[in-house]
Amino acid sequence: MRDTGVVNVGPEPLTFDDVIKVARHGAPVRLTDDAMAAVAAARQRVDELAESPVPAYGVSTGFGALATRHIDPALRAQLQRSLVRSHAAGNGPEVETEVVRALMLLRLHTLATGHTGIRPTTAKTLAAVLSAGITPIVHEYGSLGCSGDLAPLSHVALTLMGEGVVRDSTGNVTEAAEALKQAGIDPVELAAKEGLALINGTDGMLGMLVMAIDDLNKLVRTADVSAAMSVEALLGTDRVFAPELQALRPHPGQAAAAANMTRILAGSGIMASHRDPENCTRVQDAYSLRCAPQVAGAARDTIAHATTVATWELASAVDNPAVLADGRVESNGNFHGAPIGYVLDFLAIVAADLASMSERRTDRFLDVARNHGLPAFLADDPGVDSGHMIAQYTQAAIVSELKRLAVPASVDSIPSSAMQEDHVSMGWSAARKLRRSVDGLTRVLAIEVLTAARALDLRRPLTPAPATAAVVDALRETVPGPGPDRFLAPEIDSAVRLVADGAVVEAVESVTGPLA
């Protein structure tokens, strides 16, 4: 992992950039002085409650449906250990390192707000584990998204206790106790309230939301690029993207997408070749070409809403019970994942629809009845060669999967904890499927770029726009131009890498400047 500088964690909200640096680039963290002061003040109040004969939920009682039992002081350390061990019940495939690092950072931030009552030494231990590159092994299944991501966060808390398994800074699987020892970190013995403070949050689903938004902001611009390449290579028109037409329906995302496509297509010799009425007999293009800004624009506006929700969540302190500024420790329902779960599901719909429209444009290239003079399947020798026939099959298979993944998880609920937790968010599940959706969209757009680039080459001697030509040039560094059939899978993989790392958008922006 790349060190991108220390990320300071205090009571103030984290930024998207903070999350990306720590989760994806391995940045270490530091608790600020303000954070340590807030943590110490809240802990003092929890210690007072722990000594009181009056039961306080999570401090001197059991949890969930067992909250009515008052726990003897001699058993409270055991209570915290038992909570973490029993809740670390995840199962299934291992969750990606970036997801675990994101949820660790976000839990640390909630601790740093001073609303959880954790001890300063425990917060420092979590920060040290994160900075040392130790990643607790968290599993796919176990979270209902209420009370937050209990099972995933419990696997993290287990690591702080020196139990369970982790990946060390080199990525090797090892016992948590050994990894902590090698890093010079002492395990903690949890005190009153600390088990709940470490596990009662929506941090996993929020971390995945932030990273999905980061990915989709790049992919929606890529969708403008791939759509523009397809409009150009299919001899479509850019007149429908004119600002005066977009202004009739003033959605900001639509205006941005249309403006991007106009800039990308500027200076195209291919567009100029059929711009006058004598050379263009079509009245209007198919929806997948003509309505690209409307779909990509709606996607942008949905991403903007999700960004607003994520920003609110990054400013939140999610725990139950919560320590208030006036010293009260109150039970609450802020751990419910519905606000995050809804937008995670919205974004899965966005990914499915962007991919669906992209696949329809790709399909038009392959059909001689609709591709306006290009060879069947863009093949070198149709019949002998199949060209991009099966590349579209791959797109279609992914799009079909994305449609299934667009079915919302957040409308489901399975009661748990003896009906105490009788309505759950399923936000973790929404986040997990969104990650797969984002990956699928990346691949679908890559195949459209690959196919459109081949079609642009086949339109020569007509010349593409400088911006679309830059994309073709970037692709041609690893993928040869049109010719007899070759092993196609590696070429698709090359295109996927160019889309995933932002190189397609960067190629365009080297000509146009920053896209909206």
Image: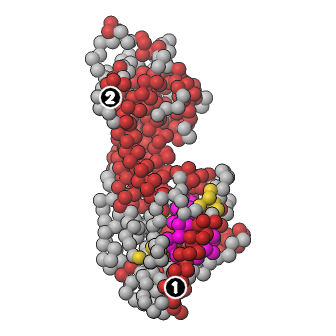
Compared to 104, does 420 lie above or below? below
Q: Main secondary structure of the magenta part?
A: helix
Residue at numbered disc 2: 247
Which label number is shown at residue 361?
Answer: none
Q: Inspect this view and state whether residue 138 appears.
A: no
In front: 47, or 182?
47
x 29%, y 20%: residue: 284
Question: Is 515 colored magenta in this rendering?
Answer: no
457, 99: nearer the viewer: 99
Q: Which residues are magenta?
A: 100-125
Q: Residue at x 43, y 42 (%)?
A: 441
Please identify the quarter of the rendering in which residue 371 is found.
top left
Label of residue 48 in the image = 1
Q: In which quarter of the view is residue 502 placed?
A: top right
Residue occupying image coordinates x 49% and y 67%: 152
Would you say 211 lies left or right of 346 here? right
Residue positioned 35% across, 61% down in the render: 338
